[in-house]
Amino acid sequence: MTGARPAPRRGRPGHDQTAVLRAAIELFNRQGYDATSMGDLAAELGLTKSAIYHHVPSKAHLLQEALDEALGHLSAVLDEARRDTGRTAYERLRSAVEGSVRVLVDHLPAVTLLLRVRGNSDAELEALRRRRRIDDELAELVAAAVAEGALRDDLPPDLISRLLFGTVNSLAEWVRPQGRYDAGELASAITAMAFDGLARR
């Protein structure tokens, strides 16, 4: 993400924009974005429908903020891995996968919403474009690790990338906040499973 985001604006007493966003993401995931109204969000927060607009300008703004949260953190993980030229591509690829798991667990509601985006609005279309760019960046790391001889070369890099991200994204179906496994355990388990299977022997 580029540029500094302005500090959260205070809304009416008892709520700020962060609290409103958290409630909106929960409702979007529970009911679907299109099926959720600003009136639903106001009721969830114990506000009147008109009062909710003291906190946020629109439902579309909340969707954009939620998608930016997920995509911003995922992009940062890939950017860091690509810039870290002091390590091999294989090491950077493992780091990117581990970091992606941590982002999913730490920002589970926002990432879950991102994974449900279908391109029904400008914000969703932009989110899909950014997701494709992240996929491409991971595929580039896979290709570099193959070129190093660290990964098997009989599978296309873009397929490996999709399988890796597919494994990470599947966590959204069953991981729960304060669940049995923390982010570190999940990151270690997934990378061990994926890379032990991919490493050339």
Image (spheres, rainbow, N blue to C red):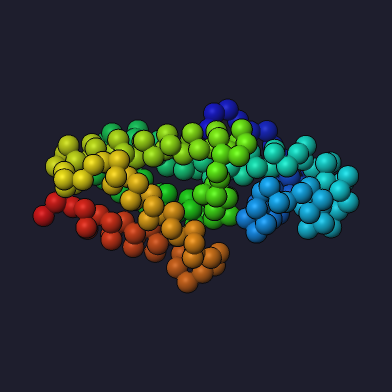
Q: Quadrant of the C terminus?
A: bottom left
Residue at the extreme bottom of the image, as rendered: 180
Is 72 situated left or right of 121 in this image?
left
Q: Quadrant of residue 188?
A: bottom left
Measuring 47% from the left and 72% from the top, which residue is drawn there? 180
The answer to whether residue 155 is visible is yes
Measuring 58% from the left and 27% from the top, which residue is drawn there? 3
User: How many numbered discs sit on the rendered protein?
Assistant: 0
Is 162 situated left or right of 152 in this image?
right
Nearer to us in this view, 8 or 72: 72
Nearer to us in this view, 51 or 98: 51
Measuring 55% from the left and 33% from the top, which residue is drawn there? 126
Measuring 67% from the left and 57% from the top, which residue is drawn there? 31
Give the percent coordinates (x, y) of residue 1: 53, 32
Give the percent coordinates (x, y) of residue 65: 64, 40
Q: Quadrant of residue 168?
A: bottom left
Residue at the extreme left of the image, as rendered: 201
Q: Quadrant of residue 149?
A: top left
Give the percent coordinates (x, y) of residue 121: 62, 36
The answer to whether residue 80 is visible is no
Above or below, 79 against 31 in this view is above
